[in-house]
Amino acid sequence: MFNDVLIAEYGQCPPDCRACEEACRERLGRSSAGIQSVHLSEMDFHGVVMCKQCSSPACAQVCPTRAITRNGGVVRINQERCVGCGLCILACDSAGVFYDRESKKALTCEMCDSNPPCVEACPHGLLSLVQTKKIRESLGEELVSHGVPQCQGCTEELALRLALRVFGKETFVFTGPGCSAPVISATYNGGFLKVPTFTCRMTNMPAVMTGVKRLYRNLGKEIRCVGFAGDGMTADVGFQSLSGAAERGENLIYICLDNEAYMNTGIQRSGTTPRFSWTTTTPVGEKVRGKQREPKNMPLLMAFHGISYVATATVGFPEDFVKKLSKAKAVKNGMAYLHVLVPCPTGWRASPSEAIELSRLAVETGYFPLWEYENEVFSFTYQPGRLKPLVRFTERMGRFRHLTKEELEELSAITQKRLEVIQRLIMGEKCLFEDFTSPGSKKSLTA
């Protein structure tokens, strides 16, 4: 079940700002607030702490008077039953429960009926409320089995589940060799999906999808053909078939699940593998420092085909992802292409528990901006209040842990350049070919 959640840009507050805290106190009419600022100048840390709305809150488990409950996805403290013992404060591992000295009772954020004044009061845009009502309304029946053979922490599984809950049963799913194939095609009768599936070769999935789509059309039935493919199958081996289907205006939905390497066959580099990244075919040594080329910008290449809809997405921002899946579902004339970043803990050499956090950091550092191309117009669908340093993203992965200061600066420059290209396209400015790759032709491209 999705629940509304209050999100703060951790540790990004300006020194001594307490605007959110003051707004909360005013709303509650109390001397204490349900959100509190933390300013540690000696550690150069300035941020806020608040209730994380745990699904199984430890504070409720230790409360001797059962004053703490979780109703409607919100942790609440019954002030009449609270005796101010403080056990909940000790039990909370996120420091989200506070003690109000005036009333001598515990206090926490109760979301203000999904209209918290702290969000509007923040002058720096570092607080946001993610409302999930539209997400819940967009999701249908679960069409993927509860047990699937994916690696621990795999975000492809979540992306596939969300997509099929949006698309519904009137969907024919296609795939090819890659990490998603064991779930979609399975290895026994019946498989893991409750919709028809077909496994293609790496080189021909869009062509096969086209044939099936036209077959059903000739039989007088319109079906939704959705293809899931990895970055290698999309950017490298199968690009010719994808480009041809896009040029022909085929009414297909193509979803690239990009984990930035050929993870299924041994973590080899692909066209979307970032510069300096370690893979088994781009090792790190004294002379060779990971991959030496910049990654191919697949979503931008698809947008320049002039197809109906193109978007980037990640499971770290599910409300944005679901909205884009719904837009792709609504396309009736032409192709819809979604490029979804799916962190691979195994291939990225990261902790499985941090997969979602990596999805969010990729966006919040500008490494993977969220944008869409619709009706020949580029636009951002989410912009962080302030970009976090790229090192916050790279330091969590073994594939980047070897980076020197100079290499990190170069990778940051590449990230900034790719972000600026999208910004200029959104503003309608001209871009040179060298803005997309290395200096070369002066051929101009316009949005």
Image (cartoon, rainbow, N blue to C red):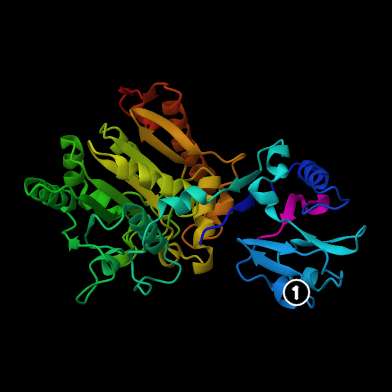
Residue 62 sits above or below residue 101 on the image = below
Which contiguous range is marked in magenta?
36-52
Identified by mark 1, the residue type is Arg
Q: In which quarter of the image is the C terminus?
A: top left
Query: Taking 383 as reference, is 157 left or right?
Result: left
Q: Where is residue 300 in the image (x, y as percent from the top left)?
A: 34, 37
Question: What residue would you read off at disc 1?
Answer: 66
Q: Is residue 233 left or right of residue 297?
A: left
Residue 387 position by quadrant = top right
Helix, strand or loop for disc 1: loop
Q: From this view, report whether residue 163 is shown above or below residue 326.
A: below
Q: Which residue is drawn at 47% across and 54% down?
A: 136
Task: From this view, report whether residue 9 is shown above or below residue 125.
Answer: below
Q: Which of 268 and 220 is in front in this view?
A: 220
- Pinpoint residue 442: horizontal percent, then vertical percent: 32, 22
Query: Whole-percent x and y of residue 433?
Result: 34, 28
Magenta highlight on residue 399: no
Furthest toward the right, the residue is 102
Q: Main secondary structure of the magenta part?
A: strand
Q: Which residue lies furthest to the front in this view?
A: 80
